[in-house]
Amino acid sequence: MKQYLIRQTFCFVLAASSFSVAQQANVNLDFNPQKNTEKLVPYGGNLISPEVSDNHTITFRIKAPDAKKVELTGGPILLALKSKAAIPFEKGGDGVWTLTVGPVKPDIYVYRFLLDGVSIVDPNNTFTGASNQPGYSSVIVHGGEPAYYDAKNNPHGNVTRHIYHSDVLNGEREMFVYTPPGYDPKKKYPVLYLLGGSGELASGWGLDGRANFIADNLLAEGKMIPMIIAMPNNQVIHRSDPQHLEKTYVLFDAELRKQIVPYVDKRYSTIADRKGRAIAGLSMGGRHTQAVGMNALDLFSSFGILSAGDLETEKLNAAFFSDPDVQKKVDYLLVGLGSGELDNIGKRSTATHEALEKHGIKHEYYVGGDGAHDWGTWRHLLNYKLLPNLWKKK
């Protein structure tokens, strides 16, 4: 099998400088990249958008002289603004549409524009999402200092992009692997297998989730143990396939057992047994964690179900609950979701929580943060719950 290794670093530069820089200049990994004190237009753009002020208000702009209507949309930004409907812009005489909103709490918010009813990215925003779904833009609302998900002036780990051939899926696959600062091949490290959701790429946890920066900062603060974080592509069949559910669990189980776990154990200095492995994921990745990972107690001992769950947990996890030693085999199990998704995902998460309680399985059920089914929630869960509790000394 031919294998290819591409080094890719997300995280080697410092975060906040002592002076203000131009918006979206991509000079440093600043925590306030859309604070435009110099009023400079992004390279290749024609306007400044978005522009974030220290009072946490945001100004969006778009030049569309022939448009009849422009609106702001996107679940995360509308939730932060407590709006259930798209918010209209005002058109100026120069054909520039403008909207100022907020203040909102410091965080990273996904949004789109509706241009005469057509959903588009902000054409002047350089922070544009890259996932297996239509494009989106991100607005970074800064606080007074770098946030828990920002690059800070402390030691940074590496993120490596691996390209490998899968005999299970008959094609070339990718996986990103984070190694902590000071990674030593002579030591053995536990591994967290961190999964994305529907429409996510393997790079999602690194780019939108900021998983590597979160881990760097927690390690610098002594709040987690050094670990390897493997972020594979858990899309094993087209998400719109009519038999997606019937096929995906079987395929992903085989991909984990035959390709992903052996690949990581061969190339890294891992604790290569179930006690040294955890699996967690968001949304669809949470479903994969529950349907595949929790039924694979020979592979994993810790689990994170983020913004997911199942109304028939006992049926989905029949093998898990039927294991006579299951209570001894689970080291840590998190069922977590955002405070803004209780009315939908919450029903499934609650059902999973109640099934675990019924069977006496020790776990943590957590609802927190200000987000809903979005990266604001998943960054929060990773930072405040999942990473600090994995392999924590009793």
Image (cartoon, rainbow, N blue to C red):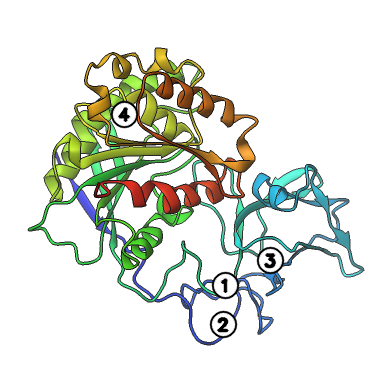
Give the mark toward the camera: 3 or 4.
4
Residue 293's tag is: 4
Do residues under tags 4 and 2 come within 8 Å of each other at their CB atoms?
A: no
Q: Position of residue 315 (x, y in %)?
A: 41, 12
Towards the viewer: 316 or 20: 316
Q: Is residue 236 visible?
A: no
Q: Residues within 10 Å of mark 1 (few under 14, many from 20)?
A: many
Q: In the rendered image, which quarter contains the N terminus?
A: top left
Mark 2: which secondary structure? loop
**Which residue position holds label 3?**
50
Question: The disc labelled 1 sits on which kind of residue?
Answer: Pro
Mark 3: which secondary structure? loop
Question: The disc labelled 2 sits on which kind of residue?
Answer: Val
**Which residue position holds label 1?**
33
Asked which quadrant contains residue 99, the reply is bottom right
Question: The disc labelled 4 sits on which kind of residue?
Answer: Gly
